[in-house]
Amino acid sequence: MRSFINVEDIGPLDKAMAEAFEIKNDRYKYQHLGKNKTLMMIFFNNSLRTRLSTQKAAMNLGMNVIVLDVNAGAWKLETERGVVMDGDKSEHLLEAIPVMGCYCDLIGVRSFAGLTDREYDYAETVLNQFIKYSGRPVFAMETATVHPLQAFADLITIEEHKTVERPKVVLTWAPHCRALPQAVPNSFAQWMNAADVDLVITHPEGYELDPKFIGNAVVEYDQKKAFEGADFIYAKNWSNPGVTNPADYGKITCEDRSWTVDTEHMSWTNNGKFLHCLPVRRNLIVTDDVIESPNSLVIPEAANREISCSVVIKRMLEAL
């Protein structure tokens, strides 16, 4: 596996899931694969779970780890071609990337959407430059449009906690005070479409995700109807994806607090479990009582980030 961005990259999901549970039972089983190998983790944006879980996964597999915070301690990087570099950016990504590749065997990249230029964001401009110029296998630690390590961990969590063979899983929009990317909901929808679940996506009108991520999911604008009989509720805010109106891309066009997930919302479900990728704005996305309830899986979900990343790095090491 030379790159990991979308669910297709992981191959058959049943094999990936079996591997995840094998690794969860023995996290150091494949430590020999990473001996004398180095992972470079490159962060253009802040991180807690991704940073810690990815580093832990690499160490479990015997790797050395280099962490580079581009915005703290490195030269400011220019990402656009044809720019006269007479501003505050001292180095171009096209020189920086192959240099980074000289010092490692695998590269993980985290680079969020700018939310001003939909075409630029959805072209995954920064990530694709790493894939093209680094000479190394590259995996996404959240990009402008996807967060596959999170979605893989979400699926592991659902598999561990489901009580029916084919659960009903609901991805619900929730309000937020800042404009957020669509990466997490995009990947969640993509991975749930590939899994054996019934996926429903609910959000205000105008917040439709890109059709390539919606797939075969049912889109329901009535949140209560969507929640009815659900086994899992995945709450996440995203800014306007600009699908129905490109001029709205990256904007907050709805602030309806009635979408906040509270105990009444959860009462509509089939004793549903609550999921969120974290960090979460309490009493905006979800109320205290829901996130602290016995049905909240946000901590086991976060713990599974180590497992999903272990599978990905293992696959990449095996392909070296």
Image (spheres, rainbow, N blue to C red):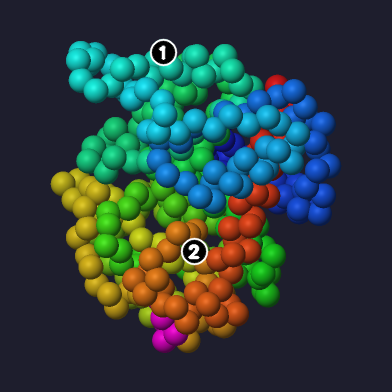
Instruction: Specify the principal SS of the magenta part.
Output: helix
Quadrant of the image occupied by residue 125: top left
Q: Amino acid at mark 1?
A: Glu
Quadrant housing the N terminus: top right
Q: Secondary structure at mark 1?
A: helix
Q: CA distance from mark 2 to mark 1?
A: 37 Å
Which of pointers 2 and 1 indicates the residue nearer the eye?
A: 1
Name the residue at the front extreme: 73
Q: Work out whether mark 2 precedes mark 1 in sequence or the reverse, and give the earlier one.
A: 1
Which residue in the structure is indicated by mark 2? 276
The residue lying at 51 percent from left, 40 percent from top is 141
- Residue 75 x/y as whole percent: 37, 22
- Residue 92 x/y as whole percent: 35, 17
From the viewer's perspective, is 275 left or right of 123? Answer: right
Is residue 33 visible in the rendered image? The answer is yes
- As drawn, 109 above or below 94: below
Q: Which residues fall within the magenta stretch?
A: 261-265
Which residue in the structure is indicated by mark 1? 95
Counting labels gives 2
